[in-house]
Amino acid sequence: MSKTAATVTLSLRPRAAGATLLRWLYDEIRLAIVEGRLAPGARLPSTRGIARQYRVARGTVVAAFEHLIAEGYIEGSVGSGSFVRKVTALAPTTATAPRARARASVLTPSLSTRGQRLVSHPFPLRMAAKTHTFRLDMAALEAFPIKTWSRIASRCLRTGVPSLLAHGETLGFLPLRATIAQYVGLTRGVQCSAEEVVIISGTQASLDLIARLVLDPGDRAWVEDPCYTAIPSLLRAVGAEVVGVPVDQAGIDCDAGRRRARVAKLACVTPGCHFPLGARRCRCSGDWRFSSGRAPRARGSSRTTTTVSSASAAGRSRPCAASIAPVA
């Protein structure tokens, strides 16, 4: 840099509350360079001059200059002074300003198409903070065996191996999946193996996973009307067309569903006891027959099978399964 360059007047804004003198000096000088208020090649006042002007210790100013030199904003040497480096001039020239603004508008962060659908169809369930009964998002927490759970968890951690803390299987902890498969076979009549069980964090996560795996934007999906209010929002978020199907004392009315949407790819049916009407009979049981074997079918895809179950008053399981067969 030329030693004859005129020294600029350094005008700094007042220090913000809580900011250290070093941080304030560094931020203000750097911002002046980035915004173009300190032009490339401009000679900065001496550290003594800055210290005297703003009544700070010269060592604080020297430390701020050292940070700016290390990061490439300024350069200089003993006897010649400190100058703004040309390579750090980030303020656009008059000729390049329109192009820079256009590029900045293109690079503005925005949500994806799916993200925009999620925002337009948010989770609709809103419960008052003081509501303690009939809450759809709250289990009977007082019935959870916390002491027993804590004791078992402590024993497993004491005797566990380091691999328990590493990445596990994608489908979930295998011994837990095996236990779940055995449990639903005894209590729900669902015949499955551990390889067919996936551990999910909750109902919403499982529905979201199924929707993303099964549905494409524009696909139709049967939903009970009325139903759990979060299901339509979730399906619309993946781009599906939600078709409400009436429900009576025997469950979802498939004849009405065919009249409303003959071609559908997914049907969401409450297993056992319908929510929110409370119908305890499921059309999926033995007395449910698709007329001529016809039911919703995905366009150009294989059939989808839905398996649900219910329990009788005596506690015996009643298997309840039906395959969604191709449309004739």
Image (cartoon, rainbow, N blue to C red):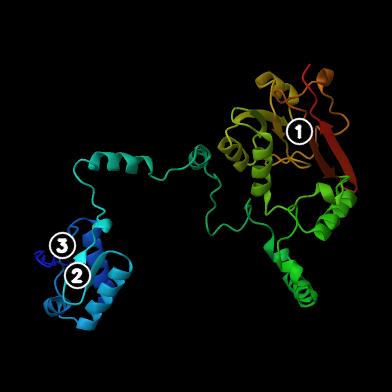
Which callout, 1 or 2, points at the residue further toward the start of the chain? 2
Whether pointer 3 and pointer 1 mark residues with C-beta atoms closer than 8 Å, the reply is no
Mark 1 packing: few (<14 Cα in 10 Å), some, or many (20+)?
some
Residue 174's tag is none
Q: Furthest-top residue in view?
A: 328
Q: Residues within 10 Å of mark 2 (few under 14, many from 20)?
A: many
Residue under label 3: 42
In the rendered view, does 218 fall on the left or right side of 194? left
Q: Quadrant of residue 242?
A: top right
Q: As displayed, is residue 54 above or below residue 212?
A: below
> Could you tell me if the residues under marks 2 and 3 are in contact, i.e. CB atoms within 8 Å?
no
Q: Secondary structure at mark 2?
A: strand
Can you identify the residue that label 1 sits on? 249
Q: Which residue is mark 2?
A: 82
Give the mark, 2 or 3, whose residue is nearer the N terminus: 3
Q: Nearer the viewer, mark 3 or mark 1?
A: 3
How many numbered markers are drawn? Answer: 3
Q: Position of residue 287 (x, y in %)?
A: 87, 29
How far is mark 2 from mark 3, CA to CA?
9 Å
